[in-house]
Amino acid sequence: MYFYKKQYIFCIIFFISSLSLVAQEFIYFNKTYWGDTLNIHSRALEQVDDGYLIFGSYASINENVLLYVRKIDREGNHLFLKKLILENNGIGGLFSGSYSIVTNDRNILLCIAFPEHADSLSDIHFMKINSEGNILWHKIHKNNFINGVYEIIQTEDKGFAVVGIQRTSMQEPGVGYFLKTDSLANIEWEKTYYLDGHTGITSIEQVHDSGFIISGAGYQLGTEFDMFVLKTDSLGNEEWRRTYGGEEDEGYSYIKLLTSKNQYEQTGKMEYLLIGEDEPIQSDDDLYIAKLDDRGIVLWENRYDDFAGLNYPYPFFETMPIIKNGGFKIVANYRSIKDTRVPVLMDFNRYGQVNWQKTMSIDTSANVYIKDLQATPDGGYIMAGFKFSPAPQQSWIVKVDADGNTCWIADCDSTVVFTDIEEPSVSSNSISLSLFPNPASEQVEVVYQLPKNQEGILKVYDYQGKLVVNYQLLMVNGGLTLEVGDWVSGVYLYSLEIEGERLESGKLIVEK
């Protein structure tokens, strides 16, 4: 394999004579978008045949735009920006990628809630647009409530299901809200669900028996706010519900179906992945991951309060989990020790154990968010977010490969060309880290190369995020031996850091 990178990054050119190769390009980019605006946010993205559509809001000196669409090509180059809804009062709107979907006819449907005037009730807006950002239709659902939308999906009958929260006033507790429409967003039925107090639904998925699995959080006497999962039939009638969490507040939860259609036809059972926030007594919030059976009973669960040594409390999720190859990926916006938000892309195996994690940022001192995560056809992932502070606020889109790698300089892009030739020897200014054998049982040899006049740190964490190795690397070229004979069998994460930046990472398997 060899590679070259185009702008703002290392450029390595190799000449190979008398050799014909078939190569495949993989596009990375890490770009910000802004212009004559006071702020501009990107909160959702969808893939179209010739690029990506980005959705968000912005404010300029002359106007506030509640909803815009930007189109970029496959390399992240700006193509156009169109205003869809002008903002009247600054309340509500599009908050994350859960508010948009690609429909079965390859158009985009957006669902958002906002009031027409500052003192009016929040209406639910359905807007369908094509790949060129043109509005095909726009429908408004009005009722005598303040509505909030958290996720929209397309159902097997080509209609839509919307979940969120509904309340009579901002001073009254809300109820979980479920709205079912036909393919043109005409209302078919509505349902509400309530625990002992304020209740909201944050995610929904239609499952193989044509019913729905939904999750959220609600207040219960004795345990305050808990995560909950609720199973309904195809008409939204409740079949069962369960709650999860401890004696402190849990803020939200996301649910995903793990069972394939073929598995369900063979067993008649379904299993689910539940991800949320769990707050133990006298502790910061934990990342909570559980596998549930077809009645919501926990098969296994994991909690992470110091994820991979980051020591970031208060995980907040706004991207749905992506299930792939038995495991899954998510992005959590953590609060850093500097009290800024830090997005972390996390990869887990099928048992909810950490394979690797990578911090996503365009400015390590800034308050940045990721609001949407999508898998791309080339095996990579693309994320939409924004830099919130310090000013200027900027729209931000980053494209990574399957292992979360990209170019990390703001407004960079790169092309990696994969071939079957051997990787050439690295230059004296390159960075490398290798561990072997892998898997290992007794000893692991570490070989590294650092840039001139730089020192590095080798860190190794176990799957629970506990730091087991913290070794300073002083030489440009060097090696060391790790004694792993007394380590517990399992998957460990290792990384090479220089000046606090993680530059190389991977996983080490210890087997006895």
Image (spheres, helix red, strand yellow):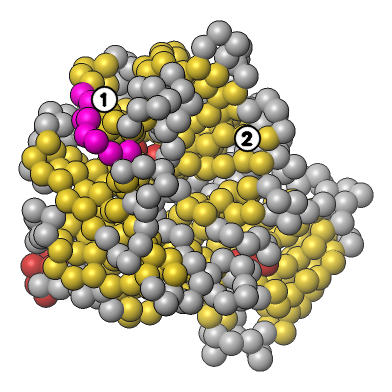
10 Å crowding of disc 1: few (<14), some (14-19), many (20+)? many
Q: Nearer the viewer, residue 163 or 300?
A: 163
| Alpha-carbon span between mark 2 and mark 1 | 27 Å
**Segment colored magenta:** 139-146
**The disc labelled 1 sits on which kind of residue?**
Met
Q: Quadrant of residue 61?
A: top right
Going by the image, does 48 lie left or right of 81?
Answer: left
Kindly identify the residue that appears in the image at 31 percent across and 43 percent down. 168
Residue 456, position as x, y percentages in the image: 82, 58
Residue at numbered disc 2: 388
Q: Secondary structure at mark 2?
A: strand
Q: Quadrant of residue 508?
A: bottom right
Q: Please say if 499 is above or below 76.
A: below
Give, as a three-letter code, the residue at label 2.
Phe
Q: Is residue 142 magenta?
A: yes
In the rendered structure, does residue 190 fall within the stretch colored magenta?
Answer: no
Give the residue pinned by disc 1.
127
Give the residue furthest to the top: 62
**Dividing the image into 4 quarters, which one contains the C terminus?**
bottom right
| Residue 338 pos. (x, y %) | 75, 51
The image position of residue 9, as x and y in percent, is: 70, 33
Mark 2 Cα within 10 Å, few/some/many (few <14, many 20+)? some
